[in-house]
Structures are given as structure tokens and as C-alpha cells.
Amino acid sequence: MKYSSVIAALATLSQGLGTRETGCCFHLDAFGDPSGPVVQLDDGQNRIEQDGLPEGQYCLTADGGLTDAKGRGCILTPPTTQWQCDAGASPTPGFSITSDGTLSYHDDTTFYACPSNGNKDFNIYDQPVENQQGCVPIWLQADNCQATPPAPEPTPPPPTSKCPRDLPAVGDYEFPHLIIPIDSANPKTCYGTQYNGSAHGTISSIFNFDIPTSTQGKTCSIQFLFPEQSTLETSAYTYSGDGVFKFAILNGPASEWTTFETSPKVVTDYGSFSLSPGNAYDIASIPCPAGQAIGIWFHTTGNGVLDFFQDYNPCPIGVYVVPK
């Protein structure tokens, strides 16, 4: 399966999720496994889980570059894309910080931690290092410089039925053909296909959709339907916490053997949504990738908990793709 056409179509839709406030400075914490504060060697290499080193401080430049506390330019060194800060170097542009404080590079918030010379500490990369074992995806959280959050979603119009939104006729919408849970706390564990979508703590879910060739030239609406528990006939869900969840589209679908470590990379992060029962949410509209398979990642960065049985019976609940 080739995904280049999907990525090209979606790249044009990347949202302006980040801020580039010149001179704003911050520290970073890594989330995933490994995790902890980002520290610096004397030579400017940025590390995770190395004891006895000072915490790094980074400042944004006008074009989205980063400098460290010593004024060194932070770069992605070729060919490995290791992130380090070198004296006399011009900072690599394109960095920003999202409204929830996540560091991104060209609107992609996934970085990679790879072992340093077989040690227990890790270097940071934009891409996994070819032929190196132990590289895992991580996310970097800043303690300052967050972008201004987007305006709240408008209040959904009153539903025309007891459901927050009805699905079109069978054949006019896409149901996920595979739902795969992954766990950042157990990055090598494969859980296989499930009927439930889950997002809580370190658990998240990837939804696969096969987009028919008949959708060529159409727009595909990614939707999340979240009815009241009392309106469900053959489904149920568990919901608690702050209700804030995130959606992103990946550079390919998951397989039955996908783990957190092997999960596809984020192409477009659609940001945070405050989900509450009784509502329908329009996550994004994209050019339909006709004849392709896509993966949609559902996860949380706070204390939200949502576990639901994906079901199209009244009232429909879950993630759907509707060509228009």
C-alpha cells in the first residue's frame, strides 16, 4: 500500500497549532518510555535519563528556531537528525509549541529517543535512526510558551432525533475495519484487534478506515459521535475525568500486530477536543484518499477516560468517516 498521496493531501491541511513567540524560553520534559527532564551535556547534546546533568533551557527565535541557555543554535544534525545545540550553528527553523505545551517540528509532535552508545541514557531525534535498535517515539512537553488555545467549538445545533447525529444510509459512510489499542507504558506489547475504542492514561487506540475508490474527488469528514448513555441500544461506554481527548491522522494504518513502538507516525495533529455525552464532533475534513487505508489515532494527554463499544446501531457512537 502506498501512502505518499495521502500524506501529500493531508500535509496541506496542517493546522497552525504552535506559537513562535520570539525570545520565549522554556524547559522540556519527555513523555513516553523513556521519560523525564531533557538535560544537556557540556557539548550541547540533549539527553533523557542521564543523571548528573543540568536541565536544558531553550528559547524560540523568530523563524521557529531554538537556542539554548548558552546561545548555541539547536539543530537536527544530518543524516541522523539528532537534536543538539552547537556553538556557531544556525538554529534549524520550524519548531513551535502547541496550545497544550507540546513541542512540535513542522506541526509534528512525535520525536524519537534512541540509546546513546548502548548506555541507559537517550539522545533525541526527529526520526528513528536507521539500523539502530531501541528507538522509541516520545513527546516533549514545555513548561512555558504555550500557544493561545483555539476558540471553543460552537455549540452543536439541536439534534433532529434523540441521537446527536444520525449516520447516512449504509454505504455512504465508513466504519472502522480495525481498532488497535496501544500502550506507551508497554511499548512492545501487541494487544490485537478490539471492538472498543479506548483512551486513558497510557492507553490509546488506532482506528483503520479503508476509503473506497468511489470517493475520488470528494471530501471526507472525520466525525466523532458521542450520544447519551440512555440513548444506546446495543452499546455502552465508560467516561470520566476532564473529557479532553486528541485526534491525529497517521502516515498509514495499523495492523493486528501493531504496538506502541511500531505504530505509524503522526502526519497531522488535529488538537484537543472537549468531549461530552450528547454531542457530535467534526474532527476534520480532508480530501478523500480514494483507494487507500488510513489510520486515526485517539488518545488523551490529561486525566480523561473514555472506553466505548464502537457501534452504528441507534444511537451510533465512535469514529466515522463520511464522504461528501
Image (cartoon, rainbow, N blue to C red):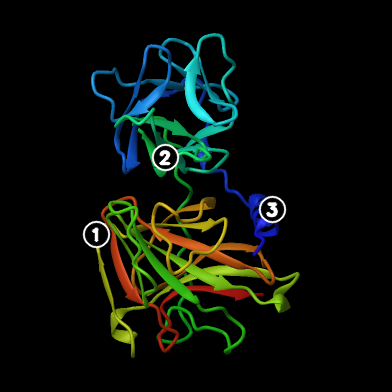
Q: Tag count in the figure?
A: 3
Q: Is mark 3 on a helix, strand or loop?
A: helix
* Number of residues whose C-alpha sits closer than 10 Å to that of mark 1, classed few (under 14), some (14–19) or many (20 or more): few
Is 215 situated left or right of 132 in this image? right
Q: Judge depth for marks 3 and 2 and give the one in front.
A: 3
Residue highlighted by disc 2: 102
Residue name at image x 30 percent, y 66 percent: 306
In this rendering, the label closer to the viewer, 2 or 1:
2
Query: Mark 2 falls on what kind of element?
Result: loop
Question: Between residues 96 and 250, which one lies in front from this camera angle?
Answer: 250
Instruction: Give the spatial CA distance, label 3 vs label 2.
Output: 24 Å
Q: Residue at x 65, y 68 (%)?
A: 292
Mark 3 or mark 2: which comes first in sequence?
Answer: 3
In the rendered image, residue 110, in percent from the top left (x then y), is placed at 47, 43
For the residues labelled 3 and 1, the Cα–Cα distance comes to 36 Å
- Residue sitting at x 43%, y 10%: 70
Q: What residue type is labelled 3?
A: Ala
Pointer 3 or 1: first along the chain:
3
Residue named by callout 3? 8
Q: Mark 1 points at which residue?
A: 241
* Vertical arrangement, residue 110 with respect to residue 87, above or below: below
CB atoms of marks 3 and 2 within 8 Å: no
Dot 1 amino acid type: Gly
Q: Is 231 rendered above or below residue 301? A: below
Mark 3: few/some/many CA within 10 Å (<14, 14-19, 20+):
few
User: Horizontal and vertical percent for residue 40?
Assistant: 36, 19
Instruction: From this view, report whether residue 26 is shown above or below residue 216.
Output: above
- Under mark 2, the amino acid is Thr
